[in-house]
Image: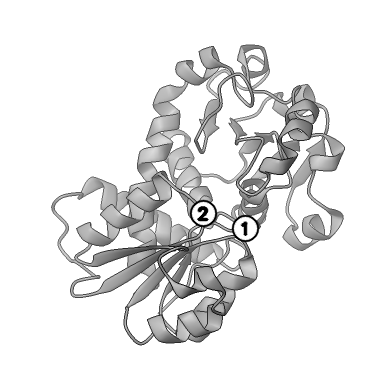
Amino acid sequence: MNHLLSIEKLSRAEMEKILAAAAIMKRERGRHKTHPLAGQTWALIFSKSSTRTRVSFEVGVTELGGRPMFLSATDIQMGRGEPVKDTARVLGRMIHGAVFRTYAQADVEEFAQNAKIPTINALTDEEHPCQILADMFTIQEKRGPMAGKVVTFVGDGACNVPGSWMFAAATLGFELRIAAPKNFQPGAALLKRAGGKIVCTDDIQAAARGADVLYTDVWVSMGKEAESADRLKTLAGYQINQSLVKLAKQDALVMHCLPAYRGREIDEPTFEAHAQTIFDQAENRLHVQKGILGWVVA
């Protein structure tokens, strides 16, 4: 039994195993030789709304032979104040695995510790490991191994997506550049913890030059709505657009983990010019989720 709680806690070998499994899952979709979740019921416990994560896990669990059970925060007593550890100890006696999407990273870790069943972090305020694994799968599918590549993240560099990218960069040996205003850059303690080759700058053009990948995410993450006006004002100059793409490598990938707010973090023409990559990236959530599911129950 394994857990996927954080990119930080995955070894290079574990990442490569999940990504290799995802390639097989994609190639053999609809004709899997084995169904590792046969006879199992998996709970999807979501305190935050979701499209890609929810659908990919529900479909993935089903295609691997299991039964998904979606539980929103309003469906269970945890939403009324029951401690995470108590919910975990109950569910751990009834289900076979859990996919948990919530706010605090500590809640996912506490759930795994007390439920004693395979637990997957489907997003917290600190990390989004499933997303980054799918992103790396997409890059490798289109441009080969991650080692030596330059990934430039543009926008809110202190949110969960760049946080997970930081740990991946150190493990797989690629350069991560984070282009963000100074107050939207990761803290010194996190940078030190991540290690690897990470460059933080408020110079968006310098960060984009020669990059293999330009990547962005929403400027107002879930739970940050009260800060919306300030965030939109401060991040206004940190947009992926056609002029920025020209600074990157000629064949650079433009990626977005969605949902996209055109005219903010990316403009409409750039989004549509790179829609094939962006929606391949979205589809790959399914295949990688299935690779993760197979790995946690191995």
Q: CA distance from mark 1 to mark 2?
A: 29 Å
Marks 1, 2: nearer the viewer: 2
How many residues crowd mark 1 within 10 Å: few (<14), some (14–19), many (20+)? many
Residue 258 point in image, percent of width and height: 50, 36
Disc 1 is placed on an element classified as helix
In the picture shown, does residue 246 fall above or below 154?
above
Disc 2 is placed on an element classified as loop
Residue 138 point in image, percent of width and height: 44, 40
The answer, for residue 21, to whether it is visible in the render is: no
Disc 2 residue type (three-letter): Lys
Task: Name the residue carrying label 1.
Answer: 171
Disc 1 residue type (three-letter): Thr
Residue at 74% x, 47% y: name it: 158
Closer to us: 209 or 126: 126
Residue at 80% x, 29% y: name it: 234
Task: Name the residue carrying label 2.
Answer: 48
30 left or right of 58 in image: left
In this rendering, the count of numbered labels is 2
In the picture shown, does residue 122 fall above or below 162?
below
